[in-house]
Image (spheres, rainbow, N blue to C red):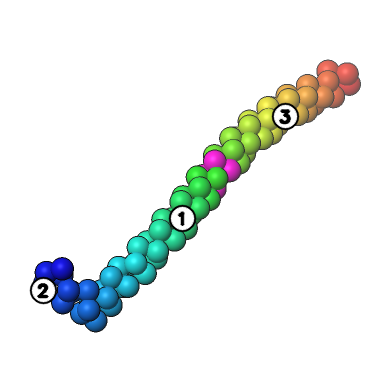
Amino acid sequence: MSETARSQSHNPFVAAFESHLARAEAFYAQAATLEQKALEQAQTQLDESARLSRETLAYGAAMMAEWRKASLEMARRTAQLFTVA
C-alpha cells in the first residue's frame, strides 16, 4: 500500500467526510421519495379540482335550463289569466 493510500485510510477527516456523504445520500433518497409522494398528491388534487369544476359547470347549465323553463311556464300562465277573463 502506498503512503498516500495508507494515510487516507487512517485519516479521521476522510472517514468523517465519507460518513457525512453516506448520510447525505440517504437524506436525498428519502427526500426524493417524499417529493414523489407530494407530486402525486398535487396531481390528485388538480384532477379532483378539475372534476369539481366540470360538475359545477354542468350543474349551473342545468339550473339555467330549469330557470328558463320555469320563466316560460310562468309567462304562459300569466298570459292565460288575461285571456280567460
Q: Residue at x 22, y 74 (%)?
A: 9
Q: Residues within 10 Å of mark 2 (few under 14, many from 20)?
A: few
> Residue 22: x and y, percent?
34, 67
Q: Residue at x 54, y 41 (%)?
A: 47
In this image, 57 relative to 78: left or right? left
**2 or 3: mark nearer the eye:** 2
Q: Residue at x 88, y 18 (%)?
A: 84
Instruction: Name the quadrant containing residue 56.
Output: top right
Can you name the residue that lies furthest to the front here? Answer: 1
Lower sequence index among marks 2 and 3 = 2
Q: Which secondary structure, mark 1?
A: helix
> Residue 59: x and y, percent?
66, 35
Q: Amino acid at mark 1?
A: Thr
Quick one: 3 or 66, which is closer to the camera?
3
Q: Residues within 10 Å of mark 3 (few under 14, many from 20)?
A: few
Report if residue 29 lies within the magenta region.
no
Quick one: 54 or 17, which is closer to the camera?
17
Lower sequence index among marks 1 and 3 = 1
Q: Residue at x 20, y 79 (%)?
A: 11
Q: Which residues are magenta?
A: 45-49
> Residue 18: x and y, percent?
28, 70
* Mark 1 → mark 2, Cα distance in angstroms: 42 Å
* Mark 1 → mark 3, Cα distance in angstroms: 50 Å
Quick one: 68 or 48, which is closer to the camera?
48
Residue on which disc 1 sits? 33
In this image, 80 relative to 37: left or right? right
Residue on which disc 3 sits? 66
Q: Amino acid at mark 3?
A: Glu
Quarter of the image that includes the N terminus? bottom left
Is residue 29 shown to the viewer in this render?
yes
Q: Amino acid at mark 2?
A: Glu
> Residue 71: x and y, percent?
72, 29
